[in-house]
Image (tube, rainbow, N blue to C red):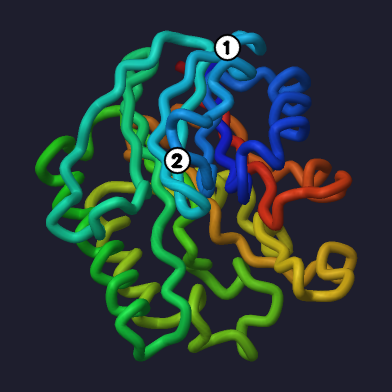
Amino acid sequence: MFKIASFNANSVRARLPIILDWLENEKPDVLCLQETKVEDHNFPAGDFNAAGYNVIYKGQKSYNGVAIASIHELKEFPLDISSFSRSGEARLIAAMVNNINIINTYMPQGRVPDTDEFTYKVNWIKNMREIFNHYYNPDMHLLWTGDFNVAPEPIDVHSPDKLLGHVGYHPVEHEALQFVKDWGFEDVFRRHVPEGGHYTFYDYRVPNGVKRKMGWRIDHIWATRPLADLSRHSRIDMEPRMKDKPSDHTFIIAEFDV
């Protein structure tokens, strides 16, 4: 069995106790992190190594940042996204683990619709299809995971009628994400959990948002169909979101019979 998880840490150093505790209890083969918010020379690689994990990372000061940790050997696979991603933004890292290709992304947030930031986000998403065309094919065992900053379906947000048109749940974002999905991906979580009410993100600014289930499912694990067919389980772990000083996101997990 191969277990992969994704977690927007909202600062890997601030969330390190939660992450290390989770790794000890869950023992995933791979953990993908977003919003590490740390320059490479300050990334706590030694703590991951001490926990039995190899780790690769790309970071910048105070913003963005991505990492992949694994109990297996990690072979970083460089992808050139310079044609559409701003210089200096650490938003993507890719690797091969046990003959499975993994792409971990932290997609732009977009701020407000009808702004340059929103346009940048939509173009960023769409351009990922060219990355998949150039480096991969849909018959490969490929996982695309991370914080996509998009809730794809009405069941992925707590109040779909009210939120439709807001950043993160906008028809233009949905169209862009579907364009990439049609390349050959399946949402592994939805394959196993078809009902709503399961979220990965709860805004700090919403009072008692977790208890009131006012969340969004914007963190995803997608797989090419040959790999999705080997998936056995997927879930969202809410316990870390209930801990002291949590991230505003929590872990999403998928398991594969490979």
Mark 1 is on which residue type?
A: Asn
Left or right relative to 3: residue 65: left
Residue in the image at 74% along x and 28% along y = 22
Label at residue 66: 2
Residue in front for this viewpoint, 229 or 148: 148
Residue in the image at 83% along x and 42% along y = 239
Percent from the top left, x then y, of residue 144?
38, 42
Q: Quadrant of residue 15?
A: top right
Question: Mark 2 or 1 closer to N-term?
Answer: 1
Q: Can residue 229 be seen here? A: no
Quarter of the image for the C terminus: give it: top left
Q: Quadrant of residue 200?
A: bottom right
Quarter of the image for the N terminus: give it: top right
> Dot 1 lies on which element?
helix
Residue in front for this viewpoint, 8 or 252: 8
> Dot 2 lies on which element?
strand
Q: Could you tell me how far apart the alpha carbons at marks 2 and 1 are, in whole angstroms?
A: 17 Å
Left or right relative to 242: residue 233: left
Percent from the top left, x then y, of residue 232?
57, 30
Label at residue 25: none
Above or below for 157 versus 238: below
Residue in front for this viewpoint, 176 or 43: 43
Q: Quadrant of residue 93?
A: top left
Above or below for 229 versus 9: above
Mark 2 is on which residue type?
A: Val
Percent from the top left, x then y, of residue 229?
42, 33
Residue in front for this viewpoint, 71 or 205: 205
Residue at numbered disc 1: 49
Above or below for 24 versus 190: above
Residue in the image at 60% along x and 67% along y = 156
Residue in the image at 56% along x and 47% along y = 189
Percent from the top left, x then y, of residue 205?
76, 74
